[in-house]
Image (cartoon, grey):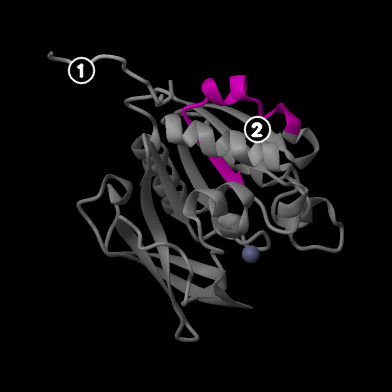
Amino acid sequence: MKKVLIYNEFYHERQNDNQASKVYPDGIHIALKQALCDEFSVETVTLETVNEITEEKLQNTDVLLWWGHMKHQEVPDEVAVLVQQAVLEGMGLVVLHSGHHSKPFKLLMGTNCNLTWRENGDRELLWVCKPSHPIAKDLGRFVVIDNEETYGEPFSIPEPQELVFIGSFEGGEVIRSGCCYKRENGRIFYFQPGHETYPVYYNPEIIKIIKNAINWAAPDYRVKMGCPHVKKPLED
Ligand code: ZN
C-alpha cells in the first residue's frame, strides 16, 4: 500500500464563525484521510504537529499532500527544505488549492506563484485537457464543482511540464488547475480545487483525481543524487 502523508494547517476549521468549521468539523485532513484510506495507508499532520515532518518521516512517505492557506509563514523554513529535498530524491508531492503559496511549493517552483482570486461561490467546470494522462483516468470531458472560490490567470508558475486540467468559472475566469512537474527524481502535481468553505473534498470525482495523482506521483526511483569526485578517468 502506498504511504500517504497529509499536511493540513487546520486553522479555518477551528474558527466557529467560519463556514469551514461546519463543512469540515474534524478538519480537511481527516475528510481527505477518510476518503483515501480505502486505497492508501494515510497519516496526517497539522501546523501544531508540523515538527513531526522529519527527514525520516518523509523517507517513509511515498506521496505528501499539502493544504495550507493563512499560516504558510508559520511553517518552519527547515521543514520546507526537508520537503524540497525529499521531492528531489523522488517523493511525490500533491499541492492542494491555496497550497500554491506554501513554502515547499514556492521553493520547488522558484517563482512567487501568485494568482488572481475572488470569492463568490461560482460554479467551476474543471476541463480535462489531457484525457490520456494517468491523473485524468476514468473522467469525462469535465468535472462540475457546484461552488468554488474563483482562481484566475495570470498564475505565476513555471510552464507546467504537463497540463491536465483547466478550470473555468461562471464569471469568465480561467486558471491552469492541474499542473504536473518533475523536479530531479520527484513528481509534483498542483491541483486547484478545495476552498475550505465548500464541500469540494466530498466530491467523488475530485477524490478520484486526487487518488490518480497519488498513484502518478508515487516514486518508482528514489535516491539522493550525489556529487561524486572521481580521481581517475574510466580509460587511461
Ligand atoms: Zn481558498
Image quadrant where residue 5 sits:
top right
Question: Disc 2 vs disc 1: which is toward the camera?
Answer: 1
Quadrant position of the N terminus in the picture: top left
Residue shown at the point (36%, 42%) measured from the top left: 212
Q: Earlier in the sequence, mark 2 or mark 1?
A: 2
Residue shown at the point (50%, 56%) measured from the top left: 110
Q: Which residue is mark 2?
A: 44
- The kind of residue on which mark 2 rests is Thr
Tell me the tag on residue 111: none
Q: What is the crowding at mark 2: few (fewer than 14 residues within 10 Å), some, or many (at least 20)? A: some
Residue 32 % position (x, y): 58, 41
Q: What is the crowding at mark 1: few (fewer than 14 residues within 10 Å), some, or many (at least 20)? A: few
Q: In the picture provided, is 178 more to the left or to the right than 46?
A: left
Q: In the picture provided, is 67 more to the left or to the right than 171?
A: right
Instruction: Pick the residue in front: 220 or 137.
Output: 220
Q: Secondary structure at mark 2?
A: strand
- The kind of residue on which mark 1 rests is Pro
For marks 2 and 1, give the CA distance: 48 Å
Task: Evaluate whether residue 232 shows in this view.
Answer: yes
- Magenta region: which residues? 51-67
Residue 162, relative to residue 145: is it above or below?
above
Q: Are marks 2 and 1 in contact (CB under 8 Å)?
A: no
Q: In the picture provided, is 127 more to the left or to the right than 92?
A: left
| The CB of the residue at mark 2 lies under 8 Å from ligand 1 | no
Residue 54, relative to residue 76: is it above or below?
above
Residue shown at the point (46%, 47%) measured from the top left: 207
Q: Which residue is mark 1?
A: 233
